Amino acid sequence: MTTVDTNIHAFADRFVQSARSLGIADPIATEVSLRRRRRTKLAPDSRRILAMYEHNGILRWEEGVGVPTPAGRRRRRAGIGQPDGRLVTQFSFEDLPTNKIGDYLTSADIHLTANQGLFRLDTADGIDRAGWTRVDGGIAQDKRTLLFVHGTFSSIDNYLKELRDPQNPAGRSFLTDIMADYDQVLGFGHPTLSVSPFLNAVDLHRHFAGVTSEVHVISHSRGGLVTRWWLDGLGGGGVGPRKAVLVGSPMSGTGLASPARIRATMDLLTNVARGLELVGAAASSVLPFMSVATVLGRVMKAVTGTLANTPLADAGVALIPGLAGQSRVGNNFEIRRLRAAPTSQGTRYYTISSNFEPTDPGWKFWQYFRGKNLLDAAADTVFDGDNDLVVDTDSMNQLVDRPAQPVAEAFSFKTNPTVYHTNYFRQPETFDRLRAWFGASSVHAATASAGGRRAGRRRPRRST
């Protein structure tokens, strides 16, 4: 077996483990080179089966029992054409009644985002031993506050892992600085599949009821929608000075959540997970993509009975409120209402965006899912243009439709082979912009190497 074979099967094993951690998958017969094909019934009628195939470096999901075939060869069984490529893995899962989808998504959210609610970052013992502590009761009214709001299938724990990673010196320096610059650093953990961005914002608004002191917000991905709903839709931005930086946020939706593209989205997320592994990304960046691809497959099979793009796909996405609320379609009335709301006076928005154009061989699958692909008419297009792997770039900077209201300042990494949706917070330029916009310290040399504490006195506060 080649190194490539070993790597892809190791990835497939981790994918199935991720699905099993959600309590939904059992592995069944896999690659012919690893096991002999079993000639027994592979799953009872009450279970569904998904099979992963690899063809020309692209991973795709198919429904039904997979039959191992040599790579690149098409085979017919019982009159049904088998997918091109080789069978990598397959697993079965219990059929999901449609009236249980809400409960299933809630359990998936708990698995993906364990810490839900408002938390305070405690670094009393240094950043390497820092942790989130749940905020019981209200927030102090006179505290200068920095708030982190995470994105889809993520968590505030991922922020902390990224910022204090020894391989991320710019993040460690920023983490040390903000603990000295702010009276309190908070994180809002929230469900992102079972609940819409608007309802997340309702919960966030309750936490900040009556807070009129200075609040700065760092929002990633879908968290930008939550932040705008809170500040502009619910009035959270009209009670005190607010600044919000929206990083890779789908302010007019993302093609990744479009019902017509949901099948391609499932395949794309799987390939992104593998691409991240191949370029050495942290497991915390990889596992969510695996989990959500599985969630999508199970819900779409429950609603439509198939993975194919059908008119029922709209109903399938509608039953995942967290995705429906960021779907880039003309009839997304939630986003249309948000974009009709003017930005609050006293709130200043900033955006960070990127157009990812990879050159690393690990990302060779990428062009297959892009609208710019002119070579393969069968390509599963997810994005029509520039994007950062997850969000359309032109969706990141415009907040209001009519009259258009530009953000205070927009920073773009432009077209590049480095910056994608899950590594914005590993780029020194990201922290440079955050410091400039928030008026935070930029004295990197003042950080203590052992515990990461700031030497000297606390800097004076700056107003907006």
Image (cartoon, rainbow, N blue to C red):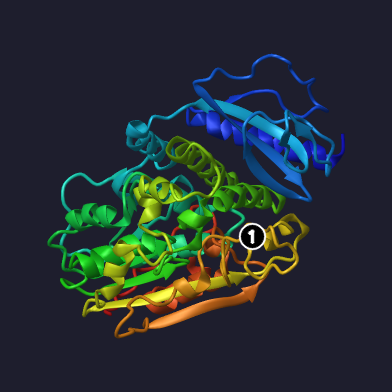
Tag 1 secondary structure: helix
Residue at far front of view:
79
Q: How many marks on residues?
A: 1
The crowding category of the residue bearing disc 1, from other C-alpha atoms within 10 Å (few below 14, some 14 to 19, many at least 20), is some
- For the point 67% across and 47% down, the residue is 274
Residue at far left of view:
210
Q: Is residue 9 visible?
A: no
- Which x, y percent locates residue 338? 28, 68
- The residue closer to the viewer here, 426 or 206, is 206
Residue at far right of view:
1
Asked where in the image residue 223 lies, by quadrant, the reply is bottom left
- 303, above or below 427, in the image: above
- The residue closer to the viewer here, 408 or 302, is 302
- The residue closer to the viewer here, 440 or 341, is 341
- Which x, y percent locates residue 187? 34, 53
Residue at far top of view:
40
Q: Is residue 169 left or right of residue 366?
A: left
- For the point 65% across and 67% down, the residue is 418
- Amino acid tagged 1: Phe
- Which x, y percent locates residue 313? 45, 49
Q: The N terminus appears in which quarter of the rendering?
A: top right
Q: Is residue 399 left or right of residue 34?
A: left
- For the point 31% across and 78% down, the residue is 348
- 212, above or below 208, in the image: below
Q: Is residue 411 left or right of residue 271?
A: left
- Which x, y percent locates residue 198? 27, 57
Residue linked to disc 1: 369
Q: The C terminus appears in which quarter of the rendering?
A: bottom left
Q: Is residue 219 visible?
A: yes
